[in-house]
Image: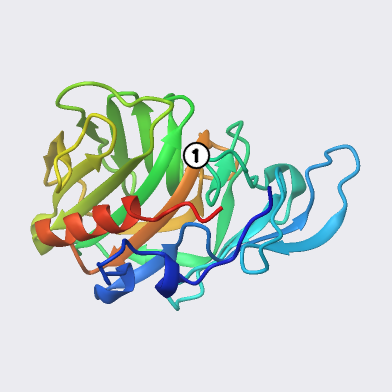
Amino acid sequence: MLGLGNSICANHYPSGDSFIPSQLAGLALWLPYNTGITSDQDGNVSSPASHSHSTAAGNMADEDRINAWNDASGNNKHAEQTTYSDKPLWETDAADIGGCNFPDGGKYFNLDGTVTINGNTDFTIVVRFRATDFDKNAFLGSSNEEFLRIQSSSKVRLKVNNLLNNNFTAPSGTLATDTYYTLILTRSNGSTGTLNLYIRGGSYTTETGVEWTGGGTRPDGPITITNIGCQADDSEGWRGVLKDVIIYNTRAVTSDERKQLFDYIEGQTNPY
């Protein structure tokens, strides 16, 4: 099965709802589902062939090596990888197509420019994901002292600027390997630095997301993000699929905006 390119505005929101993430101010990074993904090599590990495939051209093929996932925020912080063995894969399984597959913890992207969030500043991080295991899988980061990762099937860990870990724990149940979830993490209240994490998907069905316990007011230092799919190059790599990564700088989304983001992301239809 081949990929099929489609327009963000035309095909990436639920029917009857014109909301898209760029309507909210403060958009610093947007790696969108099934959009802006390119491959320059095929999946033949022993003898990879060069090519030019993309979601825009509609010619992505199974196990194509993804060299770029382009930023739709307008800030040109594209997620890129030039090393063959480190490139995430295109997956044509029905549930996973349109995202980037990180099958073994050894695949990741470097951002073309650092996303920097100042200390004592509001922010929002949104990730659509399916994990194949739950042992220290990093969504993003910049070092082993600064990351957002799954710590276990019932715990998500944030560490910022080498400060204390902030562990968010499921109020009930656990994450499953066969299910897509959307995570929204916010820091609000300026210098107070109030942290909250919400997840929707699977058994977590509350329309504004189920809040995981363990928020609070630390850490409140600056945040730098240079990697997608690991916490640092070749460290605690993601295992599973990522379909959307969105970061807002200077904005902690409201409850109503969380619902819009959840609805938008979950409402994206498989075009294949």
Residue at 25% x, 67% y: name it. Answer: 17
The image shows residue 250, relative to residue 142, as above or below, that is below
View extreme (top): residue: 173
Which residue position is annotated with label 1?
Answer: 95
Q: Nearer the viewer, residue 236 or 202?
A: 202
- Residue 100, given in percent of the width and then of the height, sits at 56, 48
Say whether residue 41 is left or right of residue 252.
right
Q: Is residue 238 visible?
A: no
Q: Is residue 96 visible?
A: yes
Residue at 25% x, 38% y: name it. Answer: 164
Residue at 22% x, 69% y: name it. Answer: 250
Mark 1 Cα within 10 Å, few/some/many (few <14, many 20+)?
A: some
- Residue 60, given in percent of the width and then of the height, sits at 69, 55
The amino acid on which the numbered mark 1 sits, given as a three-letter code, is Ala
View extreme (right): residue: 47
Q: Give the mark count.
A: 1
Residue at 72% x, 56% y: name it. Answer: 82
- Residue 240, given in percent of the width and then of the height, sits at 51, 35
The image shows residue 180, relative to residue 27, as above or below, that is above
- Residue 41, given in percent of the width and then of the height, sits at 79, 54
